[in-house]
Amino acid sequence: MKFYGEFVGASLNIRAYIAAASEYLEDKLKEGARIWLTNVTGRVPIWTGMARASLIDISRLVNGRVVLAPLKAKSRIPQGESMGSARIITDFPYFAFEVSTLVPHYVLQEFKNVRHLTGRGSPSAPWFSFAAGQAAFFEFARTVQLPPVVYDSITVKRL
Amino acid sequence: MADELKTSLGFEATEAINVLQRIQAELDAYTAAMRSAGAGTAAFNTSGGKFDKVAASLAASLNDLASAADRAATKLNEVASANRAVSAVARAAQGSLEARAVELRAAQRQAEGIMDVQRARELGTRAAELERQASLKATLQKAQETRALEAAAKARIDPKGLMPATGQAAIEKTVRDIKAANAEVSAFAKNVETAGKKGSEAGRAVLLSWQSVVRIFAIQLIHRAITQLSDAFVDGMRQAIDYQTALAEIQTIGDDLGLSMQQLDERVVAVSKAFGQPLDVVAEGLYQTLSNQIAEGSQNFEFLATSSKFAVAAVTDTASSVNLLSSALKSYGMSSTETEAVAGKLFRLIDLGRVRADEMANSFGRVAVLAKQAGVSFDELLASIAELTISGLRYNEAYTLVNNTILKLLKPTEELKRVFDRMGISSGEAGIQAFGFQGFLQKLATQSGDTATDIGKMFNQIRAIRGVLGLTGSAAEKFNDTLAEIKQSSDIDLQTAFSTIFLTDANKIKREMAEIQALFISGFGQEALKAVNAVFDAFGGGAATIKTFGVVFAAAAGAYILSSTGIISATYAMTLSMEAFVGGIATAQAALIGFAATPLGAALIIGGLILGASAAFNLFEDSTRKAAEAVIAGNNAQLRSTILTETARREELKKSETEILANMQKRLFALQAKWTQDAKFALSFQQTFLKSIGQQVEERVSLSEDFVKRLNEVAIDANNALKDLDTKIKSAALSLEGFQFERQIKGLDEGRQVVAQIQRSQELAARSAREAAIGNKESASELLKEAEALAKAALSTADTAKNRSLELRAAQQVQSILTQNVQAIEAEKRQQLAFAKAAREQVPDAESLLFQLKAIVTALEDMELIQKGLKFDPELKPADAKNKATAYAQAIQDILAKLGTRIQLFEKYDPDFGPLLRKVREKFSNPLTGQKLDLTNIFDYNFGFILDTLKKQAESLPADQKILLSTLFNIDLGDPAFISKVQAELTKIPDIIQKGAKATLDLKTNLVDQKKVTSEIEVLTNRVMVSARDITLRPFAQEATGVRGTIADIAGIISTMRGIIFQPETLRQNAEAVNNFTAIVTRDVKDVEKALQTNEPANAARKIEELQRVAQATRPAFPQLATQIDELVKKLIELRDQAKAAATLKDAAETLTPMEQKVKSLGDAEKKANEEALKAGTSAQTGYNQAGNASSIFQDQISAEIRLLQERNQLLAGGEMATAEEGITARYGGLVFRKDGGVILDPRTFYRALGGPLGTDNQLAMLTRGESVNTVDATRRFFPQIQAMNAGVAPVFRQDGGITTTVGDVHINVTESTGPRETAREVVKQFNRELRRHTITLRR
């Protein structure tokens, strides 16, 4: 009395998956960053070229678009650009972008409407542009799915 | 302290990779489990092969067992058949012999007639007696032997009595059981034999081997039995001669026995049977007994019996035993009654020592005699022999040693004699008597010093020396033990040993053989001798007889040879030989006729023939019976042995089989458990997968739900849109109805119009109520408004018509509608209250929470004011206020969390707390996300706003002021080099210093004076407002222009309207014409009526005709009139609307004037401010330019200083700078500049930014622009002032144009009246003076 059989098991090619997932998630991260940028710049008035210019860094990194058309003081665009910084982290499993701006009137009016104090400033403040960008990014991130998993086969004989 | 807006967003796939790795681990584990299962299966397959082999072997063995059982049964049947055949042959032979006996009796009777009757009777009686004895003897012996054989066989085969009763039936039952077992086993074997081909082959080999073994064993057994029988038969004749001779010899010296030859024979046979000793040996023993003269009379047989018993126990023959015992008894003068005791001691000697009885038989007497003479006791003698043989000597050597030792004691050497003398012993005998044999030897050895040399001197003979040495010294203790055991021995030991040996199978066989031999020698042999002698005598001697019977004996010999093929054949051959013998006798009978002619010859012949025939018959019968019984017993024994062996083998196989099955069962259970575990694991794995799939499905469902939710929202939006459209449609329909209604009532008189309006108003009010009832508030409200408008129109119309009744009715309708409106509003209010109540009920502590909220918000607002410095609380610092406010805000957020989603209800419906909640929620939560805001950031921003304003102000300062600021706050005033630079600088640009001092003081003032800050903020705010005018006033001016145009338009309209109002001649004329016409018609109608009433139809007809004529004449005029009326109404409507717009514009125009004035004043102020700013700007520009120049110079100097410092640092750094470190472009002081643009701090050395390596600056500092750093000395010296400044305490201001700054005890007064240069000089002079006074020092 003897038994014979064959079993085909499954195995994951995690290395290949990580490579594929990294490429995929990096693309998605940039796409999300562009969405973030669109929503952020949508809340920052166009006259503040300095504030918008501080987002140029992230725009370049993710191939995004920032419209700079200040009503006046165009000379502050380089200053604003220098006061903004951005970087992208693509170290699997972490994929993130980081944006920072030191433009004072951006920082101030992001959370505060100062017109009642200064008599000037953006009527649309507080802008909450980063919050809007964050919400848009979250909305986008919910649609991001990981790429499908590929299984390799393992054969066990003499079963 | 720069504020930063920063975010970091992204994905993290940690959980995903964890899940994947977990799945991978599970997959690996599953694969490993399956691999293990595979290995387990392979192992099972391997063990299954072993099982197959074992099962096959078992099957083969069981087949062998079955075959053996079949063969045993067959053999048994064959034996039974042979037995029956033997019985038949025996019966036939018996019948033949009986017939022959009858013939002999007949011959006897014939002889009686011939011979002496008396003699014949005697012979007859003798023959009858012989027959009876033979019969009885045969019967008795048969019974005894059968029982003995059965008992022996049973004891040997079945010692535990497990076998069933003997007999054919029992054996057959056993065979049947075996067959039944075989059938069961065959059934089992059949199940496993499919895989047992190789096993079967091996089994067949075993079967063949087994058959060979059985056959060989059977042949050997039969051959041995026949050999023994034939030997007994053949030797019987020869030994019978010897035995008879021995008996004759015994009788020659055994007169005192008083026994005849036969009696002697019987006694000897009895002893032989009793102890299994051969007859000749027993006869020899008896002869020796008699010869040794041990006993007298019958005691000789007792001694013989004891000797025989000793012979059995000591495994020797009776003769040797007789010699040994008799020599012992005789040597020590003991009687035959002590034979058993002596035999017991001798047996103990044999037992303890290394000696046999036959070795001692012929020599023991010599040493025993000597020992007796020397006084050595019998026990000591035996112990000595035993001790010496135990030490490794053979008996002969031991005997010689003891003998020589005793001899030397009896005949001592000179040396020994001297020893005797020293011991006070006269002789060896005396010494032995005094100390005992061994004790005396030990004394002697001790006297001689226990050395071999000294003992040798004493005994002077090597064998004596060895004897002494073997019994003394270390052997003394053993000697004593042996002696004690011999003393304690008795005949019981002998009896025990005898019983042990006597009951052995070997001895039993030996006794059987002796008995058989005795039969031939004592019974058949003696009688045969007589017959043979008679025959020899009859045939003239032995040679003649052999010649006569040679053929017969040859045939008998041939039959005997053939008998080696089997016992049955042997028996049959034996029968044939006897028949041949009888036949030979018959043949010889004719030869005897002549001899029988004489009476004596006849009698001898007949007597010899009878005796020979009887003896031959008895021998035949015994031999046949014994042969048959031996065969049966042998077969039974073989069968039982086979059965037992096979049963044991079967039990072993069964046990092995059970163990194998148990092991297999265990293995199967283990595999089953493992497979079950694997299955569970697989199931769990599948469940995990399914769960994962379930999660995915849930996600899909969730997405679907979201989708449905969105659809629902879209549907709701669509529904709302539909509702709006519905409302619009209803509104449009209502407008259409209104228009149609207007059209309908247009031609009616006022009364009817009023009635119609009231009715429609009522109808609309009812519809409004219905709409309100079904929740369409907007529609209801619109209908009610329309109804109200209609009711008011009806009231107006009734008023115009001066119809009081209708006016009252319309007024009631208006009142009713207003009441309905109020009711609707109240219902709305009740509903709101109900909602609020419901909300409060949903949150039991809502009201309490809301009051708490209100109180906290109030307190928080105070904190904010305090923190911003807008409110002063002596007990609360701004920083504490911030912390407290943070706590308050946290509490507010907690309350909001407790209220939860009910907040919206309260906001919407609660008139008290709704605004508060809105305010709080907007302030403390992100309006986009609804999440909590970081309160710290909020307050930081609030607080930072002020600082930011100040910073901006500072940043907006001219460059020279910035330089001065940094100079004043960052430069070490005690550095002489710097002082010289400063002095030079001050000398060059005193005006800059003046401005810088002023700006510095202004900044300090701004920093420390909150009020000033506030006013500065106000100034800034005003500036912002001025700037804002560009944005706000310009469009407002445009709007004002538009308004002006509109006003002009309105003026035109008003003018037109006035024209319409004040120049309606045509209309009035028309109206008058209409009135006239109406009056005429009315009059004519009345005339007609009057004519009809007065029965003046002609007049009436005439009037009617006039009326008709007038009507026909006026009919074309009506449409024109109607058109005019329409146009008039249209214009009136336009006028009404324009009047409304005009009124609005009028109101706006009224407000416009002050605004214009304000704008104008603002413009003037702005202009003035601009002019002032321009002035200040010019002045500032001048100062700025000067400062710029100075700054440039100063910066150049600083750059030069830095270069010097760099060079010095390079020199100090030495080789380090020369080393081109990778990634580092330059190293200046404590800063290292990297190629990539970064800056790192070199931890090894810190240098001041503008000074030398002063060695104490080891704290890193990052400053915000405008912040200052004080020197250590300055900080130490002015720490209270710095604290005061940081705490916002203002310095003292003087009003004389100058400022005084209190810095310790140093007072520097500067007057600006003489210009900057003078001021600088004054300052320097003051400095120098104070330095000379040593009230200040510029060194550190």
Image (spheres, coloured by chain):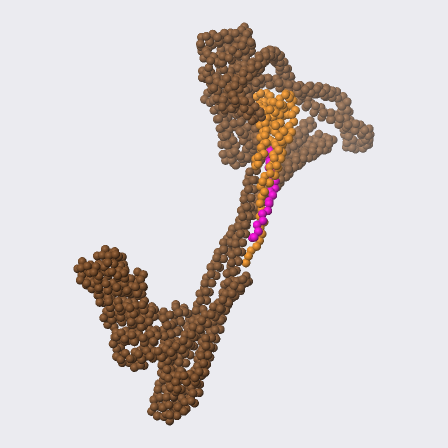
Question: Which residue is at the far bottom?
Answer: B113
Residue B37 placed where, x, y %? 53, 51
Residue B728 visible at all: yes
Residue B1147 visible at all: no
Look at the picture and state if B596 lies above or below B829. below
Task: Say whether residue A144 is magenta.
Answer: yes
In this view, the residue in front, B296 or A31, is B296
Task: Say whether residue B759 is magenta.
Answer: no
From the image, state the color of chain A: orange
Look at the picture and state if B1156 lies above or below B545. above
In this view, the residue in front, B240 or B770, is B240
Residue B179 placed where, x, y %? 49, 69
Look at the picture and state if B571 lies above or below B594. above
**Which residue: 28% across, 78% down?**
B253
In this view, the residue in front, B936 or B478, is B478
Residue B98 placed where, x, y %? 41, 86
Q: Point out the stretch of residues depicted in magenta.
A: A136-159
**Which residue: 76% across, 23% down?**
B1067
**Which residue: 56% across, 40% down?**
B17
Q: How many marks?
A: 0
Residue B127 placed where, x, y %? 36, 86
User: Where on the picture, by quarter, is residue A126?
Assistant: top right
In this view, the residue in front, B368 or B356, is B368
Question: Which residue is at the far top?
Answer: B1314
Chain that is brown in the image:
B
Look at the picture and state if B1182 lies above or below B177. above
